[in-house]
Amino acid sequence: MTHQTFAQSGNFLRKSELHQNRLELTFKYRIDEVNNFIIPSRLGVTKYVYDIKNGVLPKGINFKRHQHPQVKAFRVGQNRTDILRVVIESTQQNQQKYTIVDNRLIIPLPLGKVLRFRSKNRKALNRGYNKKKIVIDAGHGGRDNGASFNGIKEKNITLIIAKKLKAELQKKGYRVYMTRQKDKYIALERRTEYANKIGADMFISLHANAAPSKKRASKFKGIEIFYLSLAGTNRVKNGRIIFKGKSLYSKKDCKVMISSKKIKKSRKLAWIVRKYMLRNLKRKYRNVEDNGVRKSDFWVLLGTKMPSILVETGYLTDKLEGKRLMNGYYQNLIVKGISEGVLNYFRKRY
Ligand SMILES: [Zn+2]
């Protein structure tokens, strides 16, 4: 069969949809036959191959947009004129079989145990593809409004964005927890305590800013991402962290909270989240202000044992930014940016 005659009669791939636990491919016609096999590799990445008989890949379809924390790569290509090949590369085990429902091929994603390898690189390869725990902290709440301007309260904006971020990160396969789900006051030390208790891998605190006075409002705008710095702090004394006049943690815990390892990782996270936030916002909006990555000894950054950042999503007091922060589409882009930053942080694509 020549390529041309085949292309006319071929079973074209119409759609490829990535879900949390499966990849769904929709073809023009009923699928005849799928040949599935596994190619293990020494380096710890297994290739799960699906050869679809008579499958044809139309121009312009690729799997570049597919991203999943348990999958290293999704590939699709015309292996032979009469075989469309889909390859899923992962460090994890996949024992479930694919299913065919008429013109749809449903491929389960590897969510199982991490495969065992002798390779020294195993740990490095697996890092980032396991199910990470992320705590989202919607700033303020309850009697604590946070910044407030023209009737808009920071606590409400942060909760809306936090909920959207939760959904987005869950879609990417992460385990997501929130310090608050409703308009409720929660003390700062309880927020960090919660993240430490569940052994979170990451802590993201969400805030919106306000200028110090109405008169100077026009001078304050822009996104700011904070990570921990101990420079000039009066919250650490003799290796102990002091909060509200009290020493809350053991020396051992404090050591982790102020370790250079945590600070380094937090800095990397801050930079990558900034990058993707700006990229997403600038694509659709003009005059997106960048106030850069900043350092602080904010309690939520100090009291956590894992990499932590605080995102100031913008100034409520700025005419343009304040309006945008209320806009659902703008909020979605903020969320998209943060979640892409998170994904690439865990994949070590700094
Ligand atoms: Zn705040």
Image (tube, grey):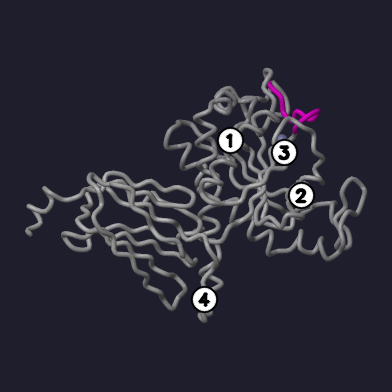
Where residue 180 is drawn, which disc sits there?
Answer: 3
Label 4 to label 2: alpha-carbon separation: 33 Å
Amino acid type of the residue tagged 4 in the rendering = Asn
User: Magenta-highlighted stretch: main secondary structure?
Assistant: loop
Residue 148 spot, x, y in % from top left: 71, 24
- Mark linked to residue 222: 1
Q: Is residue 143 magenta?
A: yes
Crowdedness near tag 1: few (<14), some (14–19) or many (≥20) residues, C-alpha within 10 Å: some
Marks 2/3: CA distance? 11 Å
Residue 30 sits above or below residue 185 on the image: below
Q: Which residue is mark 2?
A: 194
At numbered mark 4, what does the secondary structure look like: helix, strand or loop?
Answer: loop
The x and y percentages for residue 6 are 11, 54
Indicate the position of residue 224 as horizontal and vertical percent values.
Answer: 62, 41
Residue at (78, 47) in percent of width and height: 299
Q: Is residue 76 left or right of residue 207?
A: left
Q: CA distance from mark 3 to mark 1?
A: 25 Å
Distance from disc 3 to disc 4, alpha carbons, whole Å, reads 38 Å
Compare marks 4 and 2 and give the one earlier in the sequence: 4
Q: Ligand 1: does it lie within 8 Å of the C-beta at label 1?
A: no
Local crowd size for mark 2, using a 10 Å CA cut-off: few (<14), some (14–19), many (≥20): some
- Counting residues from the start of the chain, the first of labels 2 and 3 encountered is 3
Say if 96 sits above or below 59 in the image.
below
Select label 1 or label 4 by which is in front.
4
Report the side of 289 relative to 202 (left or right): left
Mark nearer the N terminus (3 vs 4): 4
Give the label, 3 or 1, closer to the camera.
Answer: 3
Give the magenta part as a residue range: 141-149
In the rendered structure, does residue 328 fall within the stretch colored magenta? no
- Disc 1 to disc 4, C-alpha distance: 41 Å
Q: Mark 1: which amino acid? A: Gly
Q: Is 197 drawn above or below residue 318 in the view shown?
A: below
